[in-house]
Image (spheres, helix red, strand yellow):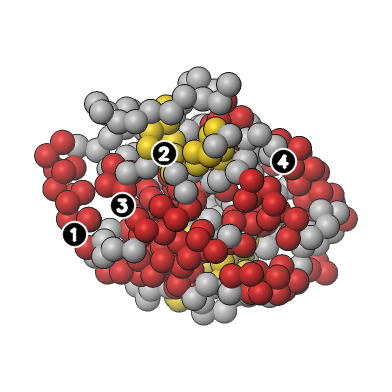
Amino acid sequence: MSTAPPNDAKGVNRGVAPVTESRGVNRGVAPVTESRGVNRGVAPVTYGTGNRPPRGDYGRARSDYTCEQDHARYTAADHDTYRRLHARQLQQLPGLACEAFITAVEHLGPPDQIPRFDAVSEKLMRATGWQIVSVPGLIPEEAFFALLAERRFPVTDWIRKPEEFDYVVEPDVFHDLFGHVPLLFVPAFADYMQAYGAGGLKASRLDACELLARLYWYTVEFGLIDTPQGLRAYGAGILSSAGELRHSVRSGEPRRVGFDLQRIMRSRYRIDSYQAGYFVIDSFDQLFEATAPDFTPVYQAVRERITREGEIEAGAVLSGEREFSPLA
């Protein structure tokens, strides 16, 4: 996810990054500035804590934060980093990732170089009516929501440095492409992402972005799905991670409970370690159906319950919740 949270510039690219408050929650999204979703040329700052602003040249981005990929500027080392990351993650997928994802990865094309976004978009458009667009890095929430609502997925165009091979703070081109794009070839998931974007635009007007960000975190980034073969991962943060794929599906340490929309919106999460808890869906149709209703009463109900009972810590299991065992 290449986005960031609200602040004074509300989505206008000024060639500089938008600033956000630090709430310890990194949504992968940058804050909204006073002119929502418009690039003013500055890099957004995320809700998570950190010692440096997001990287990326926001001065070359358009007002909606999209830019040209400029495939020619990638070096041989960049392509080699992508190839090695792809090879490492691909060999971990069988038995841990959902079959829909494994099948769709091949649509990214040969793994010997960073894919050309326009080539992937041609395939994606034919499959589900989506396309991918290049962005310089994290973008404000409202700009991100607007792109999703138009069935355009923003992909960061830079790749991590060799010394960041095992861990990169912000989403790079490998995370966004390998982790997020394959499931956009799955119609039900593609529809969910568009619905999420449309819902996000409304959430920003209702001051509910933090609640909605938790839904994104626990589904799109760190979601698990129950299949006839057992638990499988579908979240991009899991599928693009060297260690979290096995941790999420096989480790006895994290807790795994059934998907519940309001429960997720009350649940905190951590950005600096493997997840302590995961939510498990029955199908991608369940995700789409969960986002179909108007969330306005949902936000109100969640806020009222948080006022009465507080938020739920990451990894907690409540009385009566359906819990899933790790894959043997």
From mark 4 to mark 1, how far is it between C-alphas?
A: 40 Å
From mark 4 to mark 2, how far is it between C-alphas?
A: 22 Å
Of 98 and 173, which appears nearest the observer? 98
Of tags 4 and 2, which is closer to the observer? 2
Establish if 96 lies above or below 191: above
Give x and y (percent) for residue 251: 54, 23
Q: What is the three-letter code of the residue carrying label 2? A: Phe
Q: What is the three-letter code of the residue carrying label 4? A: Gln
Describe the element under mark 4 as helix, strand or loop. Answer: helix
From mark 2 to mark 1, how far is it between C-alphas?
A: 22 Å
Of 301 and 326, which appears nearest the observer? 326
Q: Which mark is residue 279?
A: 2
In the picture of the structure, the residue carrying the numbered disc 3 is 211
Quarter of the image for residue 59 reads: bottom right
Describe the element under mark 1 as helix, strand or loop. Answer: helix
In the picture of the structure, the residue carrying the numbered disc 1 is 297
Q: Which mark is residue 89?
A: 4
Residue shown at 56% from the left, 26% from the top? 327
Establish if 196 lies above or below 229: below
Quarter of the image for residue 19 reads: bottom left
Q: On the rendered structure, is 328 left or right of 300? A: right
Give x and y (percent) for residue 100: 62, 51
Count residues near mark 2 (Cα–Cα under 10 Å), then give few for <14, some for 14-19, many for 20+: many
